[in-house]
Image (tube, rainbow, N blue to C red):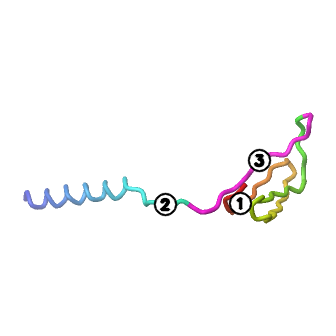
Amino acid sequence: MSTSKNRIAFLLLFLALVCCCQSANAQGLTGQISGTLTDANGGVVPNAKVEIINQETARVVTVGADSEGNFVAPQLLPGT
């Protein structure tokens, strides 16, 4: 009977360890820039074009803002 209890205890401990451990995530090589476009008076600028220029590579990424002035430029390589 104690062998069955030991097996159950071991199984519960194993399951607890598996559930608590998180998988390791590697750091990505890219980043993103996001924000809200506003004018000098603090009003949002809807549907504007945003250009992000990497000064080191001259690569240009263009994204559009939504109707509330929000934009996201994902998958950007490191640079200035």
> Which residue was labeled with disc 1?
74
Number of marks in the image?
3
**Separation of marks 3 and 1 at Cα, in angstroms:** 12 Å
**22 is higher (above) or lower (below) than 38:** below
Disc number placed over residue 60 in the picture, else none? none
Residue contact between numbered discs 3 and 1, judged by CB atoms under 8 Å: no
> Which residue was labeled with disc 3?
35
Sequence-wise first label, 3 or 1: 3
In this view of the protein, which residue sits in the foreground, 77 or 13? 77
In this view of the protein, which residue sits in the foreground, 10 or 46? 46
Q: Residue at x 80, y 59 (%)?
A: 53
Query: Where's residue 61, x and y in %?
Result: 80, 63
Disc number placed over residue 25 in the picture, else none? 2
Query: Where's residue 78, x and y in %?
Result: 67, 59
Specify few, some or many for label 3: CA neighbours under 10 Å numbering under 14, 14-19, or 20 or more. few
Amino acid under disc 1: Pro
Specify few, some or many for label 1: CA neighbours under 10 Å numbering under 14, 14-19, or 20 or more. few
Residue 76 falls left or right of residue 68: left
Residue 75 occupies which quadrant of the picture? Answer: bottom right
Query: Where's residue 60, x and y in %?
Result: 81, 64
Q: Quadrant of the N terminus?
A: bottom left
**Separation of marks 2 and 1 at Cα, in angstroms:** 18 Å
Sequence-wise first label, 3 or 2: 2
Q: Residue furthest front?
A: 56
Secondary structure under the numbered disc 2 in the rendered image? loop
73 falls in the magenta region: no
Q: Residue furthest top?
A: 41
Residue 17 occupies which quadrant of the picture? Answer: bottom left
Amino acid under disc 2: Asn
Magenta range is: 28-41
In this view of the protein, which residue sits in the foreground, 9 or 66? 66
Q: Residue at x 75, y 58 (%)?
A: 73
